[in-house]
Amino acid sequence: MVNNSLKDYHKKRDFNKTNEPSGKNTKNNNKSIFVIQKHDASSLHYDFRLEVNGVLKSWAVPKGPSTNPKVKRLAIPTEDHPLDYAAFEGVIPEDNYGAGSVIVWDKGTYENFTKKDEKKLTMKEAIKKGHITVWLKGEKLNGGYALIRTNTGEKEKWLLMKMKDEYADARRKPTSTEPKSVLSDKKLSEMKDNNDE
Ligand code: MN
């Protein structure tokens, strides 16, 4: 059964031409996962994705995440992606949606910490409210991160920021100093199209 929230994902892609997953796997019995993919599309960005109700809720973050709580990073929501996408890296061929190289820059699990008036909110409620707080357990990123919606409507915008905790580090700059894939150990520039080999 194809998850209905993946309609936009399917509409944008021809799976005869791209190696991206078509998204048959909608079950994950373990902890909720997160993934951050570095994507050299028409403009370089990081795709920040959180597993919510069988899909990956997604934001494109042009400058990528920071470990400095004083830094706010623009995050533009994009279409839901299938869970399988969390393991995808490779090259999306020219003339296809999102053409360019992708690596898995970070991955791991997360816990939803969102509260309102001392009451816990589900991820669905948090997204609706435009205020999400998660605790990441990744290979590069750890600790609290907040996503705050600042614009609604067609130009919907969010901000991604590190929260103040023991993992906050204003000097670390992991997007510069830790560029490699956590899956293949390759840099984005080293990711080659399998079909060319
Ligand atoms: Mn992308």
Image (cartoon, helix red, strand yellow):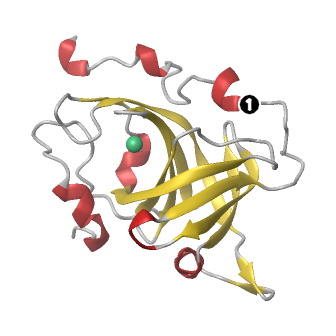
Q: Residue at x 56, y 23 (%)?
A: 180
State which quarter of the image contains the C terminus.
Answer: top left
**Where does label 1 land, which residue?**
173
**Residue 193 location, x and y as percent?**
27, 20
Q: Residue at x 86, y 54 (%)?
A: 164
Residue 12 x %, y % = 20, 52
Q: Is residue 77 visible?
A: yes
Q: Is mark 1 within 8 Å of ligand 1?
A: no
Give the structural element (helix, strand or loop) at label 1: loop
Residue sitting nearer the eye, 151 or 197: 151
Please indicate whether residue 1 sits to the left or right of residue 145 in the image: left
Residue drawn at x 36%, y 50% is 84
Q: Position of residue 191 (x, y in %)?
A: 39, 19
User: Which amino acid does the dot numbered 1 rest on?
Assistant: Lys
Give left or right: position of 106 versus 111.
Answer: left
Towards the viewer: 11 or 34: 11
Q: Would residue 55 appear left or right of 176 to someone viewing this image?
A: left
Q: Residue furthest top?
A: 197
Quadrant in the picture for the N terminus:
bottom left
